[in-house]
Amino acid sequence: MKKINVALTSFGMSGKVFHGPLLKVANGFIVRKVLERSKNESVALFPESKIVRNYTDILTDPKVDLVVVNVPDKLHYSFARDAIQAGKHVVVEKPFTLNITEGEELIELAGKKEKILTVFQNRRWDSDFLTLKKVISEGWLGEIKEFEVHFDRFKDTVPEGTWKEDPEEGASVLYNLGSHLVDQVLVLFSMPNAVFADLAKVRSGTSVIDYFHLHLYYKNFKVILKSSYQVKEPGPKFMIHGSAGSFVKYGMDIQEEALKKGLLPEGAAWGKEPAEIYGHLNYGSGKDKFNGKYESLPGNYPFFYENLYEALTSDKEPAVKATEALNVIRMLHAAEKSYRKGCKIML
């Protein structure tokens, strides 16, 4: 098996919880270098890798094939650009970029250099989203009429010393969690015809947008996306209604919490939800009807790197195309424009 040498550009939450564990178990990948400015935390997961203190040590290493750009959001463009120019394939943490023009430049540059550029939209492999796709594809709901998604959290304080609370760093819940929800909707239904957005700062003392309520308008139905950092008791994650039935799903995918506990994403039981948070499907009438729990498909974050390995070693395309990730950014920019102007923005 061909080995792909990888460098991580940071080892904060993204490196510790997501990319590190996923690469640890992914066949064909070797984490060769990890950029840590002052700490040595990655040695626990990757004792054979080299910790470096500056990005140049990664860019100038001819043995590094793939660079994972998981630095703060405003650095995504410059780090990805430098990696591609250095002849590396690149994974960019979501959101892809904060600027549409910069995203277009990265896509063009990757094409010229013949390098793979993909974005870590891991929520495509949440258990609930995979199950929702299955329910829709099986036709139980009929013609879709409305789809509502919530991704809420409760934060009663505003932490200090983190770029995620600094508006100058591009921080906001719209880009942090909204990039996941918009990506999921675009996977299901492609680009909408229009968007209307309400954005707010709901926590006392915050400087960043920590609430959004988006309306996405399609030809015959509407999608509602909501997130807030002031939700102590969350409601349903997904509610989708159609001409033949409805599907309602509570609870979050269990993979992130398992990874935070230090579990590696492997084994037959990985990503399997407990039955108590299975979704509820209600469809049909008369003899052809069902009203009860619908078993969840297992979540599968490891698929991202499994698929990427195939893309790097064959002609297969990566599951997350950079052009798709750029459409997410276009949607988020349209939402910001809608909020500023107080009106629906046509796309």
Image (tube, grey):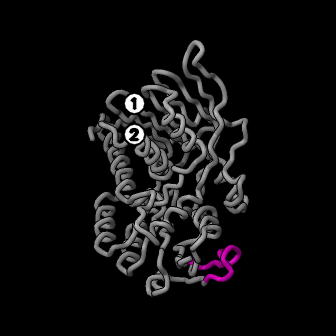
Quadrant of image for the N terminus: bottom right
Determine whether, in the image, residue 311 is placed left or right of residue 219.
right
Is 1 in front, or is 324?
A: 1
- Residue 308 percent coordinates (x, y): 49, 65
80 above or below 328?
below
- State the predominant SS element of the stretch in magenta: loop
Q: Which residue is mark 2?
A: 189
Q: Quadrant of the C terminus?
A: top left
- Kind of residue at badge 1: Lys
In this rendering, the answer to whether 201 lies above or below 99 is: above
Left or right placement of residue 249 versus residue 58 in this view: right
- Residue extending furthest toward the left: 346
Which residue is drawn at the image coordinates 51% and 62% (left, top)? 307
Q: Residue at x 53, y 78 (%)?
A: 2
Q: Nearer the viewer, residue 343 or 311?
A: 311
Q: Secondary structure at mark 2?
A: helix
Residue 19 highlighted magenta (yes or no)? no
| Residue 70: % across, % down | 51, 67
* Whether label 2 touches label 1, CB < 8 Å: no
Q: Nearer the viewer, residue 264 or 260?
A: 264
Question: Label 1 belongs to which residue?
Answer: 222
Mark 1 crowd level (few <14, some 14–19, many ≥20, 10 Å Cα):
some
Q: Badge 2 local density, few (<14 within 10 Å), some, or many (20+)? A: few
Task: Tell me if 115 is positioned left or right of 298 in this view.
Answer: left
First-in-chain label (2 vs 1): 2
Residue 28: image quadrant is bottom right
Magenta residues, as a range? 34-49
* Residue drawn 60% across the image and 45% down it: 127
Q: Position of residue 174 (x, y in %)?
A: 45, 48
Could you tell me the amino acid type at mark 2?
A: Phe
